[in-house]
Image (cartoon, helix red, strand yellow):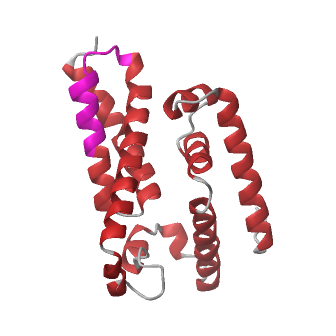
Amino acid sequence: MATERELSDFLKSVESRAFKRSVYHVRNEESALDIVQDSMMKLAEHYGDKPVAELPMLFQRILSNCTLDWFRRQKTRNALFSNMSDFESGDGDGDFDLLETLQSSDNAERTESAEDTTRRAQVLREIDTQIQELPARQREAFLMRYWEEMDVAETASAMGCSEGSVKTHCSRAVQSLSKALKARGIHL
C-alpha cells in the first residue's frame, strides 16, 4: 500500500511529463492542466491505497481517459456552439504564440541564423500537424512509445489493449508519418 508520501512523490515525478503529453494532445495549456489535475485527484481518491508499483499504469490509464473525456466534452460543446468559431483567428493556427516561442528559446537557438530557425520551426510544425492527423489510437500509441518512452507492455496496459495492437498502431503511425513527411519534402 502506498503511503501519502509515496503517493505525493509519485505525483511529483509524473506531473511535468503528464502536462507535456496533455498539452500535446489538447493544444491548450489551461485544459491540459485541468486534465492532469483531474487525473491526479482521481488517482489519489480511488487508487491511493494501491501498491506503489501499480501507480504508473493506473495513472497513465486515468490520464488517457480524462483526455478522451475532454475531447468528448469539446465535441459536444462545439456542436452546441458552432457559431462561436466565427470569432477565432482566420489563419487556422490560433495556438501558435510567438512570444512563448521566443521566451523558451535557449542560447544555442539564438545563435543560429534566422533562415535555419524558420526552417526548423516549419519542419516541427509540419511534424506536429502530421502527428495530430493520425487516427486517435495510433497517435496515442505513438506518443506513449516515443514521447513518453514507455515500453510495449506499459503502453498496452495503459491503452487497455494487447502488446500486438500497440506494435501495430506504432508501426502504422510511423509508416503514415514517414509517407506524409516525405510527400512534403521532409527527410529525417
| Magenta span contains residue 42 | yes
Residue lying at 28% horizontally and 22% vertically, measured from the top left: 47
Residue lying at 56% horizontally and 33% vertically, measured from the top left: 155
Where is residue 83, by image quadrant?
bottom left
The image position of residue 39, as x and y in percent, is 30, 39
| Left or right for 124, reference 186 | left
Q: Nearer the viewer, residue 30 or 108?
A: 30
Where is residue 169, by image quadrant?
top right
Can residue 184 be seen from the camera position used here? yes
The image position of residue 9, as x and y in percent, is 28, 28
The image position of residue 146, as x and y in percent, is 61, 44
Q: Which secondary structure class fits the magenta region best?
A: helix
Q: Which residues are magenta?
A: 37-52
| Left or right for 73, reference 144 | left
Residue lying at 37% horizontally and 35% vertically, measured from the top left: 62
Relative height, residue 164 to residue 49 (above, below): below
Can residue 8 be seen from the camera position used here? no
